[in-house]
Amino acid sequence: MLEEHRRESIPGPSYDANQLVKCIRTLFYYRHLLGHRSLTTQTLTRPCDVFISYRGADTKRTVAGLLSYHLTMLRLNPFLDSKSMKAGDKLFPKIDSAIKSCKIGVVVFSPSYCESYFCLHELALMMEIKKKVIPIFCDVKPLELRVIDNGYRAEEFQRFSWALEEAKLTVGLTFDSFKGDWSDLLETATESVIQGLIEVEEERRILKNYSI
């Protein structure tokens, strides 16, 4: 995650025609909910759609990087710290702002995710402000995840532990990088993200109409 900031190229995933058509159709419906915004809208002119929380040492070049690339190819606006931050950005203000402005979060849990203070902070903030979160358990089972006491203050340890338990009780995706099919993971994760975005927009429309 934030421990690494080298910009490295990530090979793009291969696309299945049926998968792409399905994603595009769903994506057009999402754009319809946004008010018919053009697919060519520059991503830098609007808040991020999806915040991706991940541990760089485990998944920067794999799940997190490939998913970010895949969503970008579909003209969505993901926030991936290694791609979305530039020299001179303040870490916590930039990250916190992206989380607060995003519509949904994707948390890529990996064996060393809970060893990172930054990862746990991102997770806790998403849970505290009640963002819709899609967990991806990569090479780790939910029951194996626990917060390690690295000298955190008592309130921090409690905050992180609570957020982790909330995430573990959320339906997510599981993936074994040694045996799993990467294209299937990307297809399923992308569909989950787009469907989540649609649900968030529909909820906003209902609340807006109700308040009128």
Image (cartoon, grey):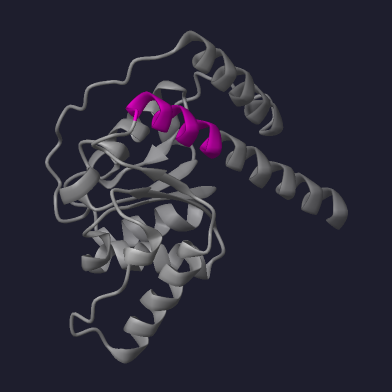
Locate residue 151, reporting x and y percent.
Answer: 18, 85
Write down the quadrant of residue 13 in the picture. Answer: top left
Question: Closest to the observer: 188 or 76?
Answer: 188
Q: How many marks?
A: 0
Taking the image as drawn, is residue 71 in sight?
Answer: no
| Left/right of residue 127 with respect to residue 59 in the rendered view | right
Residue 157: say if magenta: no
Which residue appears at 33% of the width and 62% of the height? 93
Locate residue 56, reporting x and y percent.
Answer: 20, 49
Locate residue 54, reporting x and y percent.
Answer: 30, 51
Which residue appears at 28% of the width and 20% of the height? 12
Locate residue 29, reporting x and y percent.
Answer: 68, 25
| Left/right of residue 109 with respect to residue 51 in the rendered view | left
Chief secondary structure of the magenta span? Answer: helix
The extreme bottom residue here reads 154
Note whether 184 is above or below 82 in the view shown. Answer: above
Range of magenta residues: 181-193
Write down the quadrant of residue 16 in the picture. Answer: top left
Which residue appears at 21% of the width and 27% of the height? 10
The extreme top residue here reads 17
Note whether 106 is above or below 170 in the view shown. Answer: above
Taking the image as drawn, is residue 82 in sight?
Answer: yes
Residue 192: say if magenta: yes
Which residue appears at 16% of the width and 46% of the height? 87
